[in-house]
Image: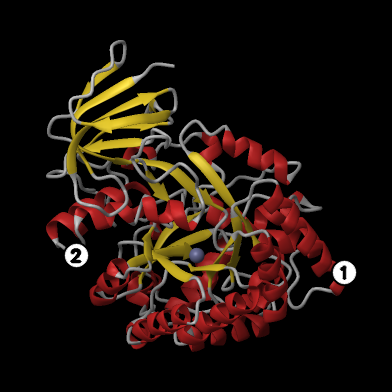
Amino acid sequence: MADYLFTNGTIVDGTGDAPFLADILTHDNRIVRIGRNLSAPGATLVECTGLTLTPGFIDSHTHSDLQVVEGRTEKLRQGVTTEIVGNCGFSAYPPAKNPADLRSFANGIFCGDDQWGWPSTEAYLRSIEESRTANVVSLVGHGSLRIAVAGNKQGAVTETELLSMESLLAEALDAGAAGFSTGLMYAPGSSAPTEELQRLCNVTASCSKIYTSHIRSYFSGLVDAVKEQIDLARHSGGKLQISHLQAVGAANWHLQANAIDAMEQARTEGIDVEFDCYPYVAGSSVLTQLLPQSALDGGIASLMARLRDPAERQTIRDGVLRSIPWRWSDIYISSVGSETNLGAIGKTLEEIADERGSDPVDVVLDLLLQEEGDATMLCFNQSAENLRASLTHPFATIISDGFYVKGRPHPRLHGTFPLLLGTVTRDRGWLTLPEAVHKITGKPAARYALSGRGVLKPGYFADIVAFRADTIDSPATYESPELDPLGIQFVYRNGQPATIE
Ligand SMILES: [Zn+2]
């Protein structure tokens, strides 16, 4: 393999330390030297005057479980060289007895078809190792684990089923999965009692791996939901990452500070808890997230039957209205499965209701029925003040949480990292460049025990991004989310130039 000598770059090394001017010499897939005026006969020269060089970015919370295997390049274009998939309870393994059950559970988040699947955990973990676009590690998703053992049913599993879940989890962690994730607002994981989570967290901690959680509530129940997770970590002794921390809905915005206080307090007690967050006030999810999750007991087919039954539909409708933290004008439809409702994409539920002479809540139920559950949304969740407080907190790792849709994705899928370094860091001054880079390189590498990654240092993997600090940014907007980033000059992964088709 060729050696490369990157000359005269401004190095921001991923540790959070101040930038310095230096050359970087690589050999095979590793960095061998960093210093001034290096010479290396035979190495290919890469002139970097005027460029900032950082470690390849680590997107430590993504839902690209299928796309990292397919070789999609949306992340690579942003400078991402490592992705952590399997978040929020959704992983592409362990295999379910009926593969259709796993697909129907995960497809809204995975943007999958009705074909994908791997015969074993090991087969999936091998296939991500061979990704052409990223270094990929995966968490074991609690929902997927549950479906493998107990199918798509709600409520407590039997002791025999729980024992099987424990052993499948331990096997997956032994086979190389990086940790365990829950998604406690998504059926069937949402129906798991705390005792079930405790048993699985104990397995994770005994394998010295991280536990990450999309907690039970980001609404009025935020603080209790964070405390439930802290208690799990207190009893397991393991490492805890609260996923995409935020307080959703204006009525709940004041709760974010309390949630962070609870984590700070836990840290003083020696509990290893931190969180991640994305640099946008809007989030995205599946449209079924608006429903009481009990409506999904038995999977999508059962939901369809309930929506067709007038009495059950009324119960679901009441449940939506009782719990919804957003205004209808804050929720946009971002994708639908069929041609029927293509006109709804990019519109708010309020706008669609006005067009149709209907109520927004009925629009939701009708869309789900017509699209057989296959619809996603983008919602304006947070205040700018809270966003700044979370992004700049020392516990925060910054992530995309992006997922693919057949429609109009959230701009974070195309722009998270350039936006962070441009708009958020350079223009608004919320973070210094070394701090921002640390939160997407050295920090997640340490958190997820990605050895040899996240820092520019001799002996480490040569994952290197070069960008222009004065122009890096993302022009992607909510209206036009698929625009490519600006200012990224090149990306090397494992010592080789990454090809972006
Ligand atoms: Zn999530």
Q: Residue drawn 60% across and 57% down? A: 179
Q: Quadrant of residue 430?
A: bottom left
For the N terminus, the quadrant is top left
152, above or below 8, in the image: below
Q: Residue drawn 12% across and 34% down? A: 50
237 vs 204, nearest the viewer: 237
User: Residue 54 location, x and y as percent?
Assistant: 28, 41
Sooner in the amino-acid sequence: mark 1 or mark 2: 1
Q: Which residue is mark 1?
A: 160
Number of numbered discs overlaid on the protein picture: 2
Colour setting: secondary structure
Question: Could you tell me the amino acid type at mark 1?
Answer: Thr
Q: Residues within 10 Å of mark 2 (few under 14, many from 20)?
A: some
Q: Residues within 10 Å of mark 1 (few under 14, many from 20)?
A: few
Q: CA distance from mark 1 to mark 2?
A: 50 Å
Q: Which residue is mark 2?
A: 430
